Amino acid sequence: MAAAADDATWERAISTATKSTSAPKTLTLDGAVKSSTGRLPSAALIGRFAASLEELSVAGAGLSSLTGLPRLPALRRLSLPDNRLSGPAALAAVAEACGATLRHLDLGNNLFAEVEELAPLAGIGVELLDLYQCPVTKVKGYREKVFALIPSLKHLDGADAEGNERLEMGDDEDDEEDNEEGEGWGEVSPSEDGKEGDGEEMDEADDEDGEWEDEEEDEDSEDDEDELDTDAEDNENIESKVSLPNKRKRCNEDDANGDK
């Protein structure tokens, strides 16, 4: 009876969360159900979204077991914080249901107390693991041991093995950012367009400057020719002025000789 009542409550919560789509990528049931059995609903209730579901969050539902977690071949993020989960069996169910695709697993504020309980995660590709406020975080050498146990792990409780904090960016945001960078590749920016336009204007200006320079050179050459003509005329005038006295002198001499 308790399981049936739970399923009815889960069914209502799932219908409310997915009323806008029949193939949701994200299913969030945080605080929607307080399970009286400590279990998830029957596998069919969540399993019908298996083909599309990429994120599943069931926080604060009083879960102590993950029995009923269906196979979710597209799931990348599973959030199960603020429950009562513990032991390797719960994580074995996770590995079986979505171990091939799971990248982010949030188990914060559950009851995992020993590093060995995390062993089922060693063979899957989980990269981000949150165990904040779990008793295991108080184990001596906790971080070093967890990183050694799970080779694929990149960040534990928000920091890498060296203690560097992870930037708050989801997987989808990373993909979108990569796509934007790819789309931007090879495009000409407005500033580059402006530069090209400036170059054409400069070329036109250079051509105009060249024409002006040619005209100035022609004018200079004409001025030089005028100056040469003027100099020639001046020289002729000077020669004519010099020759006149000589002619007069010769005429005077001739007149004198004639008188004799």
Image (cartoon, rainbow, N blue to C red):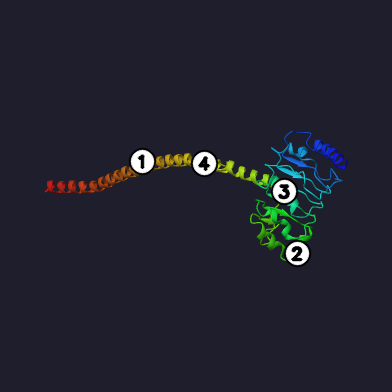
Residue at which label 1 appears: 222
Residues marked 2 and 4 touching at CB (< 8 Å)? no
Up/down of 21 relative to 202, above or below: above
- Mark pair 2, 1: CA separation: 100 Å
Residue at horizontal 71%, vertical 54%?
129
- In the rendered structure, are the residues bearing label 3 and label 4 in contact, judged by CB atoms less than 8 Å apart? no
Label 3 sits on residue? 94
Classify residue 212 as left or right of residue 169.
left
Q: Nearer the viewer, residue 172 or 148?
A: 148
Q: Which residue is mark 4?
A: 196
Inspect this view and state whether residue 106 appears.
Answer: no
The Cα atoms of the two marked residues, 1 and 4, are separated by 39 Å
Which amino acid, by three-letter code, is at mark 2? Val
Give the mark, 3 or 4, whose residue is nearer the N terminus: 3
Question: For the residue carrying disc 2, how many other residues have a C-alpha within 10 Å: few (<14), some (14-19), or many (20+)?
Answer: few
Where residue 67 sits: x, y (%)? 77, 46
Q: Nearer the viewer, residue 106 or 162?
A: 106
User: Any mark on residue 180, and which?
Assistant: none
In depth, the one of 140 and 194 nearer the eye is 140
Residue corresponding to mark 2: 139
> Real-space Cα distance between discs 2 and 3?
23 Å
* Amino acid at pointer 1: Glu
Q: State which tag comes first along the sequence, 1 or 4.
A: 4
- Residue in the picture at 68% in, 49% down: 103
Q: Secondary structure at mark 3?
A: helix
Q: Which of label 2 and label 3 is nearer to you?
A: 3
- For the residues labelled 2 and 4, the Cα–Cα distance comes to 64 Å
